[in-house]
Image (cartoon, rainbow, N blue to C red):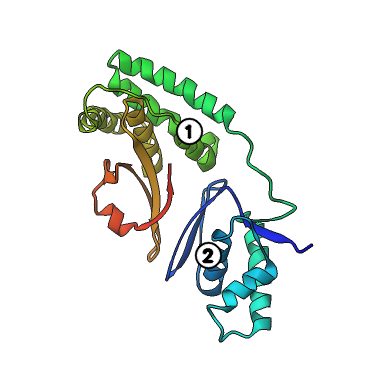
Amino acid sequence: MSTRFFISPAVCSASDKDGTTILNVERGLVYSLIGVASRAWASLIQHPQGLTLEEIITSVDQGVPQIERRRLQVDTERLLVQLQQKELVHTTELHKPQKPASEQALLCAILKAVMSCLLEFRLNSLAAFLHLLLFDVTLSLGGFRVLHNIVRNWPLTETTTGCDEERMRAMSAPMERAIRCYPRNSLCLQRSAALTCLLRNTGVPAEMVIACRRIPFKGHAWVEVQGNVVNDSSRVQVVCNTVLSRC
């Protein structure tokens, strides 16, 4: 039986005519593919059930018939080895379902309950500061993967009090104060993670967007609510137009 290749479940990617950008959530690293490598990746993305080496080569060969078949096979084999080494692709033997996220969901529920108590007593600035501290510590100790998973699993509070715009204004100002008072210089990732979860605590369906600009490369994170940027200029959607993750 031929070995099949699968995209790792811990990977987010975006492809267009210029190539593919890949985010390894486990490691917090970004990779770029162009040409034949990008076509091979696009084929794997379109087939979550996995592809054999021969199937990958055939799909790529249809797009670049000018490349000799033997050379295409060698290049594809080398590519797959590199992708496996970077844990972006798994073979049949290595592919395993992800572990249930019940522990992460429980942790998020506990953290959310604590933060919600502060908001109940209108301690918005303290809640904002603690959200910022939480994700600063998380990034330092657990890395990008843990931070990403916490934001992804942070539940949305159901509320009928006020509209989204009112709640966004009520939380954005305390977060700005917390950022100014915070003793360390926080990155856009921590700030966006903190504001996303703070807004969800008040019933605003916020999501953290992780994106990049390819040339010259620049990674960035921000918060959106229903497609509108909350903590940055709307121009960021144009400048960093390769979206790698929404959580």
Q: Residue at x 52, y 25 (%)?
A: 107
Q: Residue at x 64, y 75 (%)?
A: 75
The amino acid type, in three-letter code, at marker 1 is Asn
Number of numbered discs overlaid on the protein picture:
2
Q: Residues within 10 Å of mark 2 (few under 14, many from 20)?
A: many
The amino acid type, in three-letter code, at marker 2 is Ala
Query: From where the camera sits, is residue 222 visible?
Result: yes
Q: Quadrant of residue 174?
A: top left
The x, y position of residue 110, in whole percent, is 48, 20
The x, y position of residue 53, in whole percent, is 69, 68
Say left or right for 98 vs 21.
Answer: right
Say left or right for 148 vs 207.
Answer: right
Give SS at disc 1: helix
Question: Which of pointers 2 and 1 lies earlier in the amino acid sequence?
Answer: 2
Please tell me whether residue 164 is drawn above or below residue 120 in the rendered image: below
Q: Nearer the viewer, residue 155 or 29?
A: 155
Q: Outermost residue toward the right? A: 1
Residue assigned mark 2: 42
Please tell me whether residue 243 is drawn above or below residue 32 in the rendered image: above
Q: Nearer the viewer, residue 29 or 34?
A: 34
Q: Residues within 10 Å of mark 1 (few under 14, many from 20)?
A: some
Measure the alpha-carbon separation of dots 2 and 1.
Answer: 28 Å
Query: From where the camera sits, is residue 139 visible?
Result: no
Residue assigned mark 1: 153
Q: Nearer the viewer, residue 142 or 46?
A: 46
In the rendered image, which quarter contains the C terminus? top left
User: Dots 2 and 1: beta carbons under 8 Å?
Assistant: no
